[in-house]
Image (cartoon, rainbow, N blue to C red):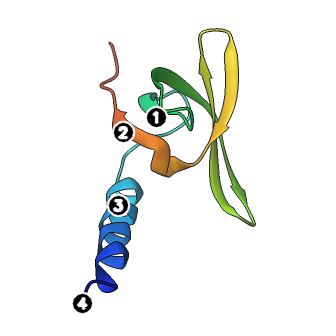
Amino acid sequence: MASSFPYLLFASWAEYTHNMDYSVGSRIRVRLYSGKVVEAEISAITNQSTGRKLQIVYGNVTASINPAQITEVLPTST
């Protein structure tokens, strides 16, 4: 039973990130691989052989991230 736990956790996490509503221009909160959490804007979404990648901009930095790194989609300011 213990061996199925990581799979169930991953399945739930994959479903969670899959159902997030984001697009180019969306403001998001992201956990970088360094552990730092930043607010960023999505500048591009690409589908690669390794899966979907998001290009984000925060401050003067541009980075490519995995959608699983998104912790929150922020409300749009109107």
The answer to which of marks 1 and 4 sits earlier in the sequence is: 4
Q: What residue is shown at x 53% (from left), y 24% (from top)?
A: 41
Residue beneath disc 3: 13
Residue beneath disc 4: 1
Do residues under tags 3 and 2 come within 8 Å of each other at their CB atoms? no
Residue with the most extreme left position: 1
The answer to which of marks 1 and 3 sits earlier in the sequence is: 3
Mark 4: secondary structure: loop
The kind of residue tagged 1 is: Arg
How crowded pointer 4 is (Cα within 10 Å; few <14, some 14-19, many 20+) is rated as: few
Distance from disc 1 to disc 2, alpha carbons, whole Å, reads 7 Å
- 36 left or right of 48 in image: left
In the image, residue 38 lies at what x, y percent? Answer: 46, 22
The answer to which of marks 3 and 4 sits earlier in the sequence is: 4
In the image, residue 44 lies at what x, y percent? Answer: 66, 36
How crowded pointer 1 is (Cα within 10 Å; few <14, some 14-19, many 20+) is rated as: some
Q: What residue is shown at x 62% (from left), y 21% (from top)?
A: 57
The answer to which of marks 4 and 2 sits earlier in the sequence is: 4
Residue beneath disc 1: 31
The circle drawn on residue 19 is none
In the image, residue 54 lies at what x, y percent? Answer: 62, 42
The circle drawn on residue 71 is 2
Do residues under tags 1 and 2 come within 8 Å of each other at their CB atoms? yes
User: Which quarter of the figure has residue 55?
Assistant: top right
The kind of residue tagged 2 is: Thr
Q: What residue is shown at x 68% (from left), y 17% (from top)?
A: 61
Distance from disc 1 to disc 4, alpha carbons, whole Å, reads 30 Å
